[in-house]
Every structure is written in structure tokens, then in C-alpha cells.
Image (tube, grey):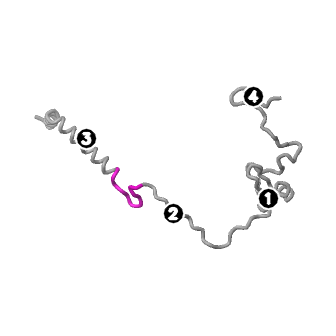
Amino acid sequence: MSLAGSINNLYKKYKKQLAILVLIFFMYKIFKYYTSSYEGYSNTGYQSPGPIIIPPGPRPTPTKCEKNSNCQSCISSNCFWGDRDQKCSSTNKSGYGKICSGSDPTCPKCDECPKLTLLKTPTFITTQ
């Protein structure tokens, strides 16, 4: 009898026991994978590094633009006013501009939101 024939006979005779042995082996490997810990990691999950402490010392002072508290003085000092944030900035960020809402006749401030009509999704027009 050849070696392959002997292995085939052993397989046929002990098929259930071999299947159980292979199953136990894989379960052991999965168990070891999930319970092992590596250096720098813990099994308790992510841990916060703690509060950030800012060392004492000089703080940045607000610029001339950031000191402005109303739109007119902000615009007149060559800065940018943010209507949503109600702040003045020296840089032209998103939402900041050179006009005050309601102060420019070409861009009036609406007292009430206009009524919208759905044309085709998502297109809207104002009622006339």
C-alpha cells in the first residue's frame, strides 16, 4: 500500500475527529488573536492623553480688525465683516465680506424669509 493510500484510509476512519481537531485549532488561534496585547496598546480600548495644558506666557493680542464690534467700523477700517458670526476679521474668510447686510441698497437685508416654490427637485424660486 502506498503512503497516499494510507493517509486516505486514516482520513476516512478518523474524519470526525480530524474535523473537531481543526476546529479547536482555529478557535484557539482566534482566541489568542483577540486576547493578546501588544506594546503600547491595552485591551481596555482608547485612553485619552489627558487635558492640554497651555503654558503661561504672552497671549496673541487681537488685531485692529478683531477689536471692531460693529459692521460699519469694521468696513471703514478696511476689514471684513461676518454677518453670521457678527465678528470682524482681517482676512477674507468664507462668509465675510466688505458690505453690511441692509446697509447697501443693492443687497438689502430681508426682514422676513421669502416664500419658496418647488419647481424641480432641488430648484426653488421666490414668489413674485
Nearest the viewer among 77 and 73 is 73
Please, what is the three-letter code of the amino acid marked with disc 3? Leu
Please report the residue visible at 77 percent of the width from the left and 64 percent of the height from the top: 63
Q: Earlier in the sequence, mark 2 or mark 1?
A: 2
Please report the residue visible at 82 percent of the width from the left and 57 percent of the height from the top: 74
Please, what is the three-letter code of the amino acid marked with disc 4? Thr
Find out whether the residues at labels 1 and 3 contact each other: C-beta distance under 8 Å: no
Find out whether the residues at labels 4 and 2 contact each other: C-beta distance under 8 Å: no
Please provide percent x and percent y for residue 98: 83, 51
Q: Quadrant of the N terminus?
A: top left
Find out whether the residues at labels 4 and 1 contact each other: C-beta distance under 8 Å: no
Q: Earlier in the sequence, mark 4 or mark 2?
A: 2
Q: Nearer the viewer, mark 3 or mark 2?
A: 2
Please provide percent x and percent y for residue 124: 74, 31
Please report the residue visible at 60 percent of the width from the left and 71 percent of the height from the top: 55
Q: Which residue is identified by label 4?
A: 117
Please provide percent x and percent y for residue 71: 82, 54
Q: Earlier in the sequence, mark 4 or mark 1?
A: 1
User: Magenta stretch containing residue 48, yes or no?
Assistant: no
Instruction: Give the spatial CA distance, label 3 vs label 2.
Output: 44 Å
Figure check: 76 above or below 117: below
Range of magenta residues: 34-44
Q: Which residue is identified by label 2?
A: 50
Q: Nearer the viewer, mark 1 or mark 3?
A: 1
Q: Which residue is identified by label 1?
A: 69
Number of residues whose C-alpha sits closer than 10 Å to that of mark 2, classed few (under 14), some (14–19) or many (20 or more): few
Q: Which residue is identified by label 3?
A: 23
